[in-house]
Amino acid sequence: MFGKRVNVRVLKTNWKELNLLIVNSSWTLNLMKKSNSTKICLGIEATADDFGVGLLDFEGNVLANVNNAFIPETGGIHPREAARHHAKVAGRVITEAFQAAKIDPCDVTVIAFSQGPGLGPCLRTGATAARALASYLNVPLVGVNHCVAHIEIGKLATGVKDPVTLYVSGGNTIVSAFDAGRYRIFGETLDIAVGNCLDVFAREAGLRPRDGVPLGAAVENLATKGETFVHLPYSVKGMDLSFSGLLTAGVRLLKKGKYRLEDLCFSLQEVAFSMLTEVTERALAHTEKTELLLTGGVGANKRLQMMLKIIADEHDVSYCVVPKQYALDNGAMIAWTGILAHEHGTSIPIEKSFVRLKWRLEDVDAPWVKV
């Protein structure tokens, strides 16, 4: 194995056979001796449109966090097309992460990957890359729940210890808090996620992601120019939310052409975020937690941040927002959660590292959380 050039091919998934070049052929590994005594985890995120690689040491220092997003020419994310994108860029992104961290692959102590929930083809592509690296480097493999990872990177980045968390993204909308060994769900969407609601409305309005600006940000920018509030369905059912009716009504009014797009964006945001704020406030009152955390891609929205700040002040609780680079899907959050799990004896044999498309947040034991 000494000085062997890497050309790992672990190619089978459930949907097609990939020629996935995991490691750039220019790498030369000396597996007989590690050049760095620091424990390091490499995390791979591939639940949806992003292929991300993060490198963190076991103290929580981010050494590298490299991401490459699949941007479809039209429409939303097609799982197989996104998976092809991930397979194409995997080797390059992994290489860039090691270059940014200025370490060698043989310095890695553990490999972590997003095991679920997410889109099947995307998850399987990321898992294939993780298995190949773990097998070649002969290090433990850890499967990470994507939702738990969003919470844990938020806690690491902001310093909160035991928050009520509002996790909002293109694929998830969850209000959670830790209790009795697991993160419990106190409220969630019953249909589509709030990020998906905003993205679909933006596409129906003819908006397109440009210069790295996501669709949700385009809606936010237009909303700041809105002047007239348009009444739209407000659907909170107990502690859960429904955004499909809100989206349908918004698109219907958009097609009628009766209202300015700016006013519709403004109104859509106000209603959606008011729903989120109501459920989050109830969770704060019920749990009596003293911290509030906002995470996920939609958490970058300034208006939502402002609305949550108001309820945090009213309840006299600490309020933190995850920095944007960690709010979006990223490899750093997978690496950090992998470290936490590994430090508490959690790993998974490669032959049992199946992806879990519908792995719910409350099904994950979190023995590392001490409250």
Image: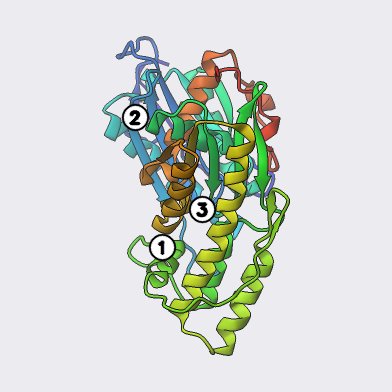
Going by the numbered disc 1, the residue's amino acid type is: Ala
Q: Which mark is residue 217?
A: 1
Going by the numbered disc 2, the residue's amino acid type is: Val
Residue at 54 percent across and 33 percent down: it is 113
Comparing 80 with 210, the one in front is 210
Comparing 263 with 1, the one in front is 263
Nearer the observer, disc 1 or disc 3? 1
Instruction: Work out whether mark 1 precedes mark 3 in sequence or the reverse, and give the earlier one.
Output: 3
| The N terminus, quarter of image | top left
Instruction: Work out whether mark 1 precedes mark 2 in sequence or the reverse, and give the earlier one.
Output: 2
CA–CA distance in space, label 1 to label 2: 26 Å
Residue at 44 percent across and 68 percent down: it is 219
Comparing 273 with 155, the one in front is 273
Pointer 1 local density, CA inside 10 Å: few below 14, some 14–19, many at least 20: many
Q: Position of residue 99 (x, y in %)?
A: 28, 34
Q: Which residue is mark 2?
A: 62
Residue at 65 percent across and 21 percent down: it is 181
Q: Position of residue 357 (x, y in %)?
A: 68, 43
Q: Position of residue 103 (x, y in %)?
A: 30, 24
CA–CA distance in space, label 1 to label 3: 17 Å
Going by the numbered disc 3, the residue's amino acid type is: Asp
Instruction: Work out whether mark 2 precedes mark 3 in sequence or the reverse, and give the earlier one.
Output: 3
Q: Which residue is mark 3?
A: 49
